[in-house]
Amino acid sequence: MIPASFSYHKANSVQEALGMLQQHGGDAKLLAGGHSLIPAMKLRLNQPSTLIDIRHIAELQTISVAGDHVVIGAGVTHHQIATNAHIHAHAPILAEAAEWIGDVQVRNMGTLGGSLAHADPAADWPAVMIASHASIEMQSASGSRTVGADDFFLGFFETALQEDEIITAIKIPVAGAHTGSAYKKFMQPASRYAIVGCAVVLTHENGKCTAASIGMTGVSEFAYREKAIEDALVGKELTPENIKHAASLAAKDVTLMSDHFASVPYRKHLASVYAERALVAAAGL
Amino acid sequence: MTKLIGQSVKRVEDKRFITGQGQYTDDIVLPGMTYAYILRSPYAHATIKSIDTAAARAMEGVVAVFTGEDIAKAGINGVPTGWQVNFKSGETMKEPPHPLLVADRVKHVGDSLAVVIAESREIAKDAADLIEIDYDVLEAVWNPADAIAADAPQVHEGAPNNICFDWELGNPKAEVDAALAGAHHVTSLDLVNQRMIPNPIEPRSAIGHFESSHDRYTLYTTSQNPHLTRLLMCAFVLGLPEHKVRVVAPDVGGGFGSKIFHYTEEALVIWASGKLGRPVKWTADRSECFTTDAHGRDHVTKAEMGFDKEGNILGLRVKTYANLGAYLSTFAPCVPTWLHGTLLQGVYTTPKINVDVTGVFTHTNAVDAYRGAGRPEATYLLERLLDTAALEMGMDPAELRLQNMIQPFDGVSQPGYMTQVALQYDSGNYQATLHRGLEMVGYEQFRQEQAEARKAGRYLGIGFSTYIEACGIAPSAVVGALGARAGLYEVGQVRVQPTGKVSVFTGAHSHGQGHETTFAQIVADTLGIGMGDVEIIHGDSESVAFGMGTYGSRSLAVGGSAIMKSLDKILEKGAKIAAHKLEAAVEDLDFAEGKWTVKGTDKSIGFGDVALTAYVPHNYPQGVEPGLDFSSFYDPANFTYPFGTHIAIVEVDPQTGKVDLKRFIAVDDVGNVINPMIVEGQIHGGLAQGIGQAMFEGALYDDGGNLINGSYMDYTMPRADDLPSFEVDRLVTPCPHNPLGVKGAGEAGAIGSTPAVVNAVMDALSPLGIFNPSMPMTPESIWRTING
């Protein structure tokens, strides 16, 4: 529980942080909420030579509505998301999911950008990002780019984020009419990460599903889109039977994780149960 | 003046705890202090082929590096065991050495290999990373039932088949066998009482401080038991003169048993400090707490209970394999034997009982007393048997209990109850707590709700536990006959200062219990002074004459009674002084409200004036010594026996197997109560730990003997939102043999609650079959139970 020695630098702007990243190279780590990085450093699983603290960068801490998107600064905390009026009005699934993250202390310190960059396979946000068609803005010294959530999560703790980049903002399309959403989570009781976390955004008209977007976390090595469930639902009536059938297709084509809280068959079973529960809630049944 | 005894006085110690002003061992910084880091084995079983410390020694800021070879060369003994259990044959138990640092073969993950002492913790840790050890990794065994197999890896050379002792208690086995053979029904359960990790909020820490000016050592340590630590360390490990060693256990952040014991690190920092001439501090990190704080429970048991046609219990047969870990911790042999077998009478009239326990070494961390220590294991098997038997025989679990319970007795006009397993219960009214529990839960109404829920496909269940425990552990002569290598009395000194203010020195140790409040309430009431005029001092071998520490719910029953004895002496002497001043006979005085009054007059003298007279004895009775200061050793006549009824109501989600604990009712009888709020707090904490065992906690090992859930990311501690709002009530059956009539409340919650929760899950699932859920009842384990 004693980290290896490191140097600490506090950045006051994204520009300054990018300069520090360039200067210190691959051994530097960005520090936001620190709720994943610092425990890893204490266990010496991670021994960065340099920490660049981006927690105090004001430009990363705003939530606004721009056109048909809610734009969330990467440094916004889970608690701010849970309590923000724009989020509640236009991207309510984020507010719902934020309440499920860790505990009060974690929600007060941990940030959306930090969680996405860390990409824990059992974190809540990745499923929600996929379900809500989020796009992630990243900046480096040579410019900025935007990647959709589906192309951001690439593997076990692996994302599209490059070493010289900082996530600056997350853009969520404003939820349209006839849209329902839900995040249902079966918690790992010790860490409170997801054993299964299923995020659902459904559009329906006259009881018929016109669009479905479903993200799943905790189940496999990284969060993914439940394409089979989506395909099974779109165009169908949102009846309990149709939902149950679609949910039974959960975790069909992924490599499932296993640990002492949930074996492969149990996790697969839970993925269906929680897909069904999230779909039922999103459909307002 | 309002009586303080019986009032929920707010805890005086909380001011410093809540405002961050507690003084814990790790807060202490001494001039010239150095910092120790202990390099520990990552393997459960391995021989050490070589150990190279050269690079660590060469690092700047490193003061010294010691290995097992240095300890062996210095002729330092291992840490001893404080309790002896003999084989059935009479042969002494196997007692292999537990060295401060291991030189040849490590025997569990976390075994100590080397200590690096440096100018900072960070340097010590960095240097420890440079120590190169060449291991030859060997096969390990962690399960006690596996460890006794003929081909199992051996932990110690001198303990064949890894057996430390075998032991039995109760009626001859043949008699119990016959009782079960003739029974109408026998309920048989294979049970695992899983290994628990105590997890006090404050990690263990120890500072060794040698002062060459006085040839004197001071050990600051996170101990529940500073005097015993001093005795064991001085007399058995380091061979130091006890009068030259002071042991201080300052504020201690919880223990749950794990801080009773004398640990290797304590002797190590004292020895190293003497060698280096500088203070040496060691503080465990959380990972070390998981791997090296003595663990609890870990029994593998077969339990069988026989009944006649009417449901009367005919006999109980218990066979337990108790995991002791790799080394014998201070009280390890006592826990699965004398603290477990003796409780198998429970609150029932069972006429024949035989318990057989095999103590087993494994390649795991030591197992010792953990909140309840042996009594939760006994209660678990008994109460699981009762609810299972009721289901199997189609009887009501509450009725089955009531018909088998020992009738009420007060221990004064009626004698204590002699059990089949060596105890005499002091006083009891067991049915009353069950009746009260049934009333609180609304039993009949619940059974109706349950029936309706079942029709709707919901799985509601109720579980019972009617427990008894033995605490206030004593008397010395008895525990000595049972193998204790120490007495089990307590010391209480009351020093009245010249101004009438009172300093109380107790051998009990508070690490969350609130002694500074409870004991002050007793003293203030007895002397008729304000609580603010009383200071409770504990935890320092230099100020407190002696002490046996705090564990086994003994502080109030034994430590409080010792203080009462001294208070009696204070009042007796005070009366002589008062009589002299009032020119009356002692027999003519009344003492009330803090003053002595001559009966039938308004002539009186206050406690403060008497105190001043004792120290300024100008006008003073002949033959009476000056001063007002008494010390007492209280060695009680018996254990105390709290009891109660715990009832759990659960709902099981059949889709996921998740157990929702909906209600928890606890009716406890802990005898008289000094501070109801503190008692309720103790009950709540115990319940959380007992429920934690049922639903969440438990050490898990892989085949190599590695602890696979040694962090808070992986080991599930119960949290507030996992638990319902507890519904608690108390009944009062005073203890007949101590002056306060108190029994003890620290462990009751943890002892009674665990089987109630498991029984409730069994009841919930009973439409699907009679299951024996294993602990912890994780959702997956229940899902698998339901789905075969």
Image (cartoon, coloured by chain):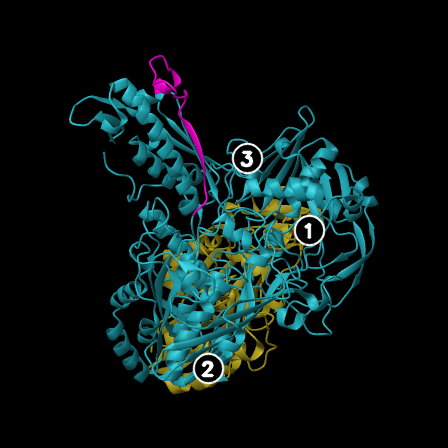
Chain colours: A yellow, B cyan
The image position of residue B664, as x and y in percent, is 35, 64
What's the amino acid at mark 2? Answer: Ile
CA separation, marks 2 and 1?
A: 45 Å
Residues rendered magenta in the picture = B612-636
Q: Which mark is residue B786?
A: 2
Q: Which mark is residue A47?
A: 1
Circle 3 or circle 2, nearest the eye:
3
What's the amino acid at mark 3? Answer: Ser
Q: In the picture shown, does residue B17 fall above or below B351? A: above
- Main secondary structure type of the part rendered in magenta: loop
Looking at the picture, do discs 3 and 2 lie on one chain? yes
In percent of the image, x 48 and y 67: which residue is there?
Answer: A128
Left or right: where A256 falls relative to A6: left
In percent of the image, x 39 and y 76: which residue is there?
Answer: B313
Tag 3–tag 1 contact (CB < 8 Å): no
- Secondary structure under badge 1? loop
Q: Name the residue beneath numbered marker 3.
A: B541
Q: In the picture shown, does residue B98 fall above or below B601? A: below
